[in-house]
Image: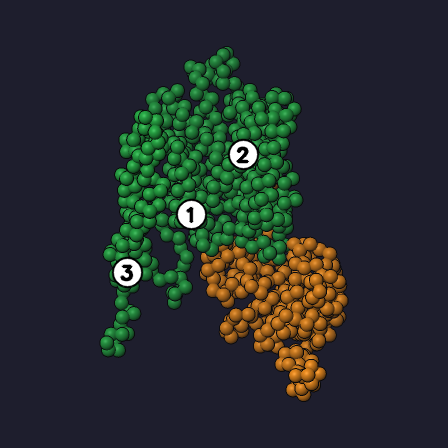
Chain colours: A green, B orange
Amino acid sequence: MDATQAAATPLAPPAARARSAFDLAAAVKDSALWAAITLGLCIPIVAYRTDQSQANELILRPRWGLVALFCAIVFGVRLAQHALLASRAIRRAATPAPQQATETVRGYPSAFQRAPTFALYAFLGVTLTFPLLVYLVQGGLAESRYWIDLGILVLTYVMLGWGLNIVVGLAGLLDLGYVAFYAVGAYSYALLATTYGLSFWICLPVAGILAAFWGILLGFPVLRLRGDYLAIVTLAFGEIIRLVLINWVPVTGGGAGISSIPRVTFFGIPFTNDEGGFAALFGLDFHPMHRIVFLYYLILALALITNFVTLRLRKLPVGRAWEALREDEIACRSLGINTVNTKLTAFAIGAMFGGFAGSFFAVRQGFISPESFNFLESAIILAIVVLGGMGSQLGVAIAALALIGGPELLRNLGFLKEIFGEGFDPNEYRLLIFGLGMVAMMVWRPRGLIATREPSVFLKERKAIAGSLVKEGHG
Amino acid sequence: MRWSNDPVLTVEHLTMRFGGLVAVNDLSFQAGRGDITALIGPNGAGKTTVFNCITGFYRPTEGMMTLRQANGASYLLERLPGHRIAWRAKVARTFQNIRLFSGMTVLENLLVAQHNPLMIASGFTVLGVLGIGGYAQAEAAAIEKAVRWLEKIKLIHRADDPAGDLPYGDQRRLEIARAMCTDPVLLCLDEPAAGLNPRESKELNELLLSIRAEHDTSILLIEHDMSVVMEISDHVVVLDYGTKIADGTPEEVRNDQSVIAAYLGVEDEEVAEVEAEVGV
């Protein structure tokens, strides 16, 4: 090999080098190995099923077809992964990494990472007209009840996600007990309405204020803690609230909860089938769905208020201080920011929106009990925020739709029965699929669905900031 | 001497102990108003500990630190909580390992520095959310101020880029600009020239000299780069093992025997004496 050739080799187009890196034989070999491991794992677990025979004896029923199916799936997935990784390597090789560049390579997020603006408007348009769309598709008010109820549920979680996003996404404080504020809001409305007969519209702000008050009360002692310790204390707070609700029987009714909570009114006009009712007043035929549709628009309005206030706060000094706190608390102190007060405001405002959502929950259900406010709720809300991309409003909304609406979708996957047999109920696999989805998310989009940060202010041009630069906060 | 006639900062008998370790031992010095005061010393001499005491990150074991503003107001720094030292006493600082808000844009970094005045303008958030009051004008003024500083540190073309994307030297200058956006009376710089090349280091000197000329800000800096220290500082304080060993103009310090001993080690004869004592 002469000198010129040796010099030319490293200058070969990087794409060509990378393409030659995909070795089909090696990929097939590796995939076959994976399939063999799957076979080994399947033999003791899947291959035989213990069953009772006609004569009441224990027999082993072989299921080699199923094992073969599993092995084939693993083989195919592994092969596809090899192909995917190779194509990614080609793409990587074609674009220089920022640290190798001799010129400035801006950390622009790709078009794939950036949330397209039209998606935002489409999302908003669909949510605003959702009851109408469902009515047209289902062909009747009564038939659309299931879908509108589902819409209300998703929107409740969107609102909770947006509320928690202030605490976790913006201020970077890990709160595992957010459901406590949801509970405070719900019980505030339930108790005030059943004991003093106050209307929902008076109780709503009161519930928010009470939840914010509890947020501050919790915040004072615990906000000196950081990271894991803060998470544990907030988790404990959530449990304490639930235990108080269970055990303080004279006030909260204990485990039996509070029932016959007054229904929502159309700003004072009840949704009843009589003279002064909503339907009679507006000249409509009475239908119980009027109230459900009104609830849908109520939670939509509450969620949009949460979103509006959050977006507004981000542009105010307090919002910038939250994000600065998430980035570097010590630098914040050196710039004269009172870190304790800043954290407390984040906690209180997040809790306030949780309280609003809670009182909505109470007015919708008409019945609440401590069981609705267990740790799993906190975990789901936190999962929504983390999955959506911490700090991203649109991401949280999409994640809420996926995490709450997705499992509901599984109820309707009847066609899977034809593949897996009559005994197959996709509903039973909900949590499994849910978990798989979460793992996949964390592998491919570890910073959440929308991992970029929008700057709160700009001089010439608004550039989204790549998620890799944005810190997650230490608690 | 200006630093004894009109001191902006008076440190008296400052002692800082961490368990059995005495990091700063009975340190007293003054920093003059309008001066650039350099705090130098070998590694581990306790310089950063002094800074952390002045800026409220450590509570000193003993001693008193008085900051006198030009209007006559004075503050005892050891009694103020950290954020009030920056906001009320107007002491700003930078860090040895740069602490920018890397996920926020350059402009946002400078706006966070103006948090307290903006917070008042937004009616402590209440009026700001409702959109009443003069927050919009206050923010415009804050952006204007940030732009002035960005032009001064020659980063105006990167204003909308994340701070974490900037090269190292630019990050150092941005951190100084961010501290200056708090309108400090005393600016404490912890090794501002660390990791800079000679050209950047010269630019830094110019920046610091222009801050001294154009603003009512006195500068206290920790530095290992002697070209920075000797060129721009008016007053040098030398620490070794937490104790002050010299204090004076750069010329006086340069020729001080104890400083030379601390930096270059002791004479050969003394080494022999020590070895004889130990019995090697």
Disc 2 residue type (three-letter): Asn
> Is A187 left, or right, of B69 in this rendering?
left
Q: Earlier in the sequence, mark 3 or mark 1?
A: 3
Tell me how far mark 1 sits from mark 2, CA to CA: 25 Å
Tell me the element at label 1: helix
Would you name the residue on which mark 2 appears?
Answer: A374
Tell me the element at label 2: loop
What residue lies at 42% left-to-right and 27% top-to-bottom? A148
> Is B192 left, or right, of A385 in this rendering?
right
Would you name the residue on which mark 3 appears?
Answer: A21
Q: Position of residue B277 (x, y in %)?
A: 71, 83
Is disc 3 in the same subunit as disc 1? yes
Q: Nearer the viewer, residue A139 or B24?
A: B24
The reply to whether residue A71 is in sight is yes
Would you name the residue on which mark 1 appears?
Answer: A442
Q: Nearer the viewer, residue A337 or A365?
A: A365
Tell me how far mark 3 sits from mark 2, CA to CA: 51 Å
Disc 3 residue type (three-letter): Ala
**Residue at mark 2: chain:** A
What residue lies at 62% left-to-right and 62% top-to-bottom? B93
Q: Which mark is residue B96?
A: none
**Residue at mark 3: chain:** A
Tell me the element at label 3: loop
Tell me how far mark 3 sits from mark 1, CA to CA: 27 Å
